[in-house]
Amino acid sequence: MEVEKAEAVELWSRETLPKVMKIVSVRLPQRDLINLLLVSPWINRNLVSHPSLWLVLDFHEMSDAGNRLVAALSLPRYQNVKHINLEFARDIEDKHLENLKNKCGNSVKNVETLNLNGCQKISDMGIEFITSNCSNLKMFSIYWNVRVSDLGIRNLVNNCKHVIDLNLSGCKNVTDESLKLIAENYQGLQLLNLTRCVKITDKGLEMILVKCSSLHSLNLYALSSFTDAAYKRISLLIHLKFLDLCGAQNLSDDGLSCIAKCKNLTSLNLTWCVRITDQGAVSLAEGCKSLEFLSLFGIVGVTDKSLEALSGCCSATLTTLDVNGCIGIKRRSRDELLQLFPKLVCFKIHS
């Protein structure tokens, strides 16, 4: 009996376990996979042989992240890493990225995604150090960094020619010069987040809208200085699916009517776009018939007429609709909204 049991365990470890680990290795987060290495020698031997385990470096929210990063990239098994996540990692500064460049810069040659969100001690020089060998980079995110300026963006576009996903949210020192660099170098850009980049103006945004025609996601959250001159050019983005204009206080009905030409829009945030009235909302309904997410929160100029138009065009697609604070809309109860939009599952975005 004991012999048969041992043979069964041996068979499972030799034939079944490798198949299971092959499936698991591409589905679990890297940290979970690392923990699995400690479960048993069999699992360890099977997992370490899968290249996917060594394609990701995830140090988000970790301490001593700078030294950890350099140490990991100095190991042969991380020579083909593709994804580096340092979101809100602690103890990472320009000096670590300079050390990385000097000691093991070739290790990041295949990196495609680089997340530096919340790494506030990294400056323009840090961007130069980390991107100088990342010629294959496709996604770059550096949310909430007030040290990064136009020089950092220049370093990025000079070193990385294939970026299609760029997040500069909260980088309050980038200006129109950065947008010019982005527009001239990343005309295949697909996702752009400029949330709270408060120094950019119509001029910079228009350069993006004219040259980056492949955009399908554009986040302009909490940017109140743009005018209709820029907003109207959003209509050039024929592939646009996601647009966040929360706080666009200068957006008028005319501007929204132009945006309504983006017929592929599925998600639109118009929270606190206080100049919008039924005229703009009706144009939106008639132009964007695939909307799934729409916030009209705080817009007092829209009435039941807007809801009726939206219901006539988007009732089959809308699953999220926020009309809280829209005092001109009288049919705002949950039951009344469900009569107009039977697929609604979310009625409140803002708390």
Image (spheres, rainbow, N blue to C red):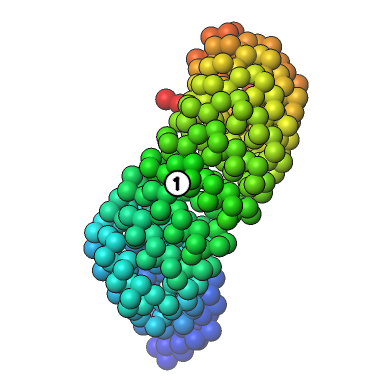
Quadrant, the C terminus: top left
Say which of 243 and 304 sits in front: 243
Which amino acid lies under the numbered mark 1 shown in the image of this protein?
Leu
Relative to 319, 39 lies left or right = left
Relative to 189, 108 lies left or right = left
Identify which residue is drawn at 42% across, 44% down: 174
- Quadrant assignment, res 130: bottom left
Q: Residues within 10 Å of mark 1 (few under 14, many from 20)?
A: many
Residue 339 locus on image (x, y percent): 67, 18
Identify which residue is drawn at 56% across, 25% down: 227
Residue 55 locus on image (x, y percent): 47, 71
Residue 330 locus on image (x, y percent): 59, 8
Relative to 69, 231 lies left or right = right
- Quadrant assignment, res 288: top right
Residue bearing the label numbered 1: 168
Relative to 299, does residue 295 appear above or below in the rendering? below
Q: Is residue 314 visible?
A: no
Say which of 112 and 253 sits in front: 253
Quadrant, the N terminus: bottom left
